Image (cartoon, rainbow, N blue to C red):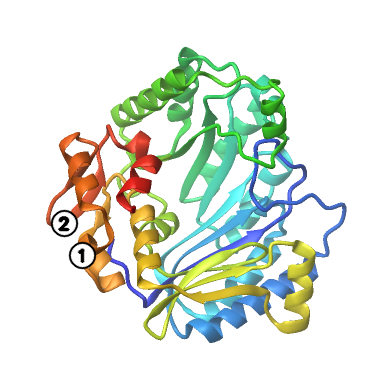
């Protein structure tokens, strides 16, 4: 997918959840009361602020993430999308995704979200087992999850859902059965994440005390391999480390990140990469919801960091992001975006060793990890980039 500075993706962060999942290290918060009108007004102000910075562009995708953006009122979503359309051109094929939890309360809002302009839903299912859902701190049941999947496919042109595997006590056979069930319900896109213990989460503390036992590294690796094989055989192969899709069902918004296109992020903790005057700028917003709202209200925006990236930093980011894709890094896109050839930024000796060991492949068009190298990608990147 070619990268063009004329195009722009938009991320809108809604930081609030009903409860904090014990494995989650995202910028999400639980609050007893939320003044949604004040938040809607502030998000509109941020859209106007970034229109001044970006100039006229064409919006190719929008992603409402969180937190739990399905807790928003559909009227708020409609208001933000209308303001976006006033500020920028909007592609005829724009993808507009909203993340949602499958509780019955939120599922009852799907029709209203579709009417507001959402055309792709991403459901946080996480498990198809009630005991594991409870252990993961989820608010829904398997029955609600299945009902929400059915509703999502009724109201939205495109729908996806997430599952977490390598969970506490999970066996390879159990994951195979669960994945098969998920594929039977899938509309062509699944996000399949291996459970990781992140510092600062409730699971991290429990894991440190020995209260959480995960499958061994060998079993987790077997689960990863099984996932690739089954999804490939069912026609939704991996197109990124944790994402699987039928042809044409890939997340266009996330492809912007992975191909290092321009995007802006509004809302607490949101970040962006934006071409301004020929340089790629990194932008980020205040993480605290209260501080973010206060700053937007008083100053018209809450951007707390804006930095023109060096060519070396931008090159490193693009390499790290694009190699997550099964198709790898486009050398042409890299040269167009960075202005230098790829070879200037990588360790040639180490890359040659990886090529010989069949961990990486490179030709005149792409550099990519092989099926053998993809599970080891983080370690390989650290060495390739020196």
Q: Which of 215 and 124 is in front in this view?
A: 215
Q: Residue at the location (37% across, 78% down)? A: 6
- Disc 1 versus disc 2: distance between alpha carbons? 7 Å
The image position of residue 307, as x and y in percent, is 51, 75
- Please give the name of the residue rendered at 19% of the width and 34% of the height, measured from the top-left corner: 357
Q: For the point 24% across and 58% down, which residue is it?
A: 330
Whether the residues at callouts 1 and 2 have beta carbons within 8 Å, the answer is yes
In the rendered view, does 323 fall on the left or right side of 284? Answer: left
For residue 273, the mark is: none
Position of residue 194 relative to residue 56, above or below, is above
Relative to 341, 270 lies left or right: right
Q: Is mark 2 on a helix, strand or loop?
A: loop
Residue tagged 2: 365
208 vs 62: above or below: above
The x and y percentages for residue 85 are 53, 77
Residue 117, quarter of the rendered image: bottom right
Q: Which of 354 and 185 is in front in this view?
A: 354
Give the residue drawn at x 19%, y 35%: 358
Residue position for label 1: 332
């Amino acid at each position: 997918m070619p990268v063009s500075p004329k195009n722009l993706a938009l991320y809108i962060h809604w930081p609030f959840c009903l409860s904090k999942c014990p494995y989650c290290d995202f910028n999400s918060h639980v609050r007893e009361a939320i003044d949604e009108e004040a938040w809607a007004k502030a998000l509109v102000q941020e859209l106007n602020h970034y229109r001044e910075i970006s100039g006229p562009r064409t919006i190719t995708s929008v992603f409402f993430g969180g937190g739990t953006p399905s807790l928003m009122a559909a009227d708020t979503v409609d208001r933000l999308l209308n303001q976006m359309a006033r500020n920028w051109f909007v592609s005829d094929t724009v993808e507009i995704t909203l993340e949602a939890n499958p509780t019955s309360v939120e599922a009852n809002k799907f029709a209203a979200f579709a009417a507001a302009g959402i055309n792709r839903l991403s459901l946080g299912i996480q498990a198809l087992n009630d005991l594991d859902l409870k252990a993961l701190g989820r608010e829904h049941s398997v029955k609600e999850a299945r009902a929400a999947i059915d509703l999502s496919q009724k109201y939205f042109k495109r729908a996806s859902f997430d599952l977490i595997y390598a969970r506490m006590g999970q066996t390879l056979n159990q994951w195979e059965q669960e994945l098969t069930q998920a594929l039977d319900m899938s509309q062509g896109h699944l996000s399949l994440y291996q459970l990781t213990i992140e510092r600062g989460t409730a699971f991290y503390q429990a894991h440190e005390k020995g209260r959480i036992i995960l499958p061994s590294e060998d079993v987790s690796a077997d689960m990863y391999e099984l996932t690739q094989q089954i999804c490939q055989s069912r026609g939704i192969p991996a197109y990124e480390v944790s994402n699987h899709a039928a042809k044409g069902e890939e997340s266009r918004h996330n492809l912007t990140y992975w191909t290092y296109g321009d995007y802006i992020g509004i809302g607490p903790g949101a970040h962006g990469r934006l071409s301004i005057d020929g340089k790629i700028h990194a932008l980020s917003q205040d993480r605290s919801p209260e501080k973010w709202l206060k700053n937007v209200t008083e100053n018209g925006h809450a951007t707390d960091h804006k930095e023109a990236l060096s060519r070396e930093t931008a090159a490193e980011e693009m390499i790290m992001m694009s190699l997550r894709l099964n198709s790898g890094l486009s050398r042409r896109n890299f040269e167009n975006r960075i202005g230098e050839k790829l070879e200037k930024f990588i360790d040639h000796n180490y890359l040659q060793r990886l090529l010989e060991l069949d961990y990486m492949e490179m030709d005149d068009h792409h550099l990519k990890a092989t099926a053998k190298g993809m599970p080891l990608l983080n370690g390989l990147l650290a060495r390739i980039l020196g």
